[in-house]
Image (tube, rainbow, N blue to C red):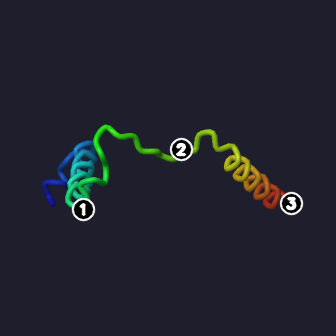
Amino acid sequence: MSQVQELSKIDKLRLMQFLATELVKEEDAKFFVANQEYPVWSPYNCSEAANVLMNLLATKQQEQNG
């Protein structure tokens, strides 16, 4: 553990990635398949969620000012 604490941030991240990959391999060999695409949610083009947040902020500002 002391050796891990001495690692740089990037090396700690690489170690985390390595350990996560190893755990997946042990758990289920077909969890991730090489060269296959996996969908990832992104907040881009989510205008409805942005509108909800803007309305919430506007309401909060009105409460503070009123």
Identify the element where label 2 is drawn: loop
Q: Nearer the viewer, mark 3 or mark 1?
A: 1
Q: Are marks 2 and 1 in contact (CB under 8 Å)?
A: no
Q: Residues within 10 Å of mark 1 (few under 14, many from 20)?
A: few
Q: Measuring 76% from the left and 58% from the top, which residue is drawn there?
A: 60
State the image coordinates of residue 21 (x, y, percent, origin top left). Answer: 24, 51
In the picture of the structure, the residue carrying the numbered disc 2 is 42
Q: Is residue 52 above or below residue 46?
A: below
Q: Is residue 16 found left or right of 3 in the rendered image?
A: right
In the picture of the structure, the residue carrying the numbered disc 1 is 27
Give the mark, 3 or 1, whose residue is nearer the N terminus.
1
The foreground one among 30 and 14 is: 30
Q: Nearer the viewer, mark 2 or mark 3?
A: 2
Give the mark, 2 or 3, whose residue is nearer the N terminus.
2
Residue 29 image-quadrant placement: bottom left
Give the mark, 2 or 1, whose residue is nearer the N terminus.
1
Quadrant location, the N terminus: bottom left
The foreground one among 37 and 12 is: 37
In the picture of the structure, the residue carrying the numbered disc 3 is 66
Q: Residues within 10 Å of mark 2 (few under 14, many from 20)?
A: few
Q: Measuring 26% from the left and 54% from the top, which residue is drawn there?
A: 20
Q: Residue furthest right?
A: 66
State the image coordinates of residue 7 (x, y, percent, origin top left). Answer: 19, 48
Which amino acid, mark 3? Gly
Between the residue at mark 3 and the residue at mark 1, the CA separation in whole angstroms equals 56 Å
State the image coordinates of residue 5 (x, y, percent, origin top left). Answer: 20, 55
Which amino acid, mark 1? Glu
Q: Measuring 69% from the left and 43% from the top, which residue is drawn there?
A: 47
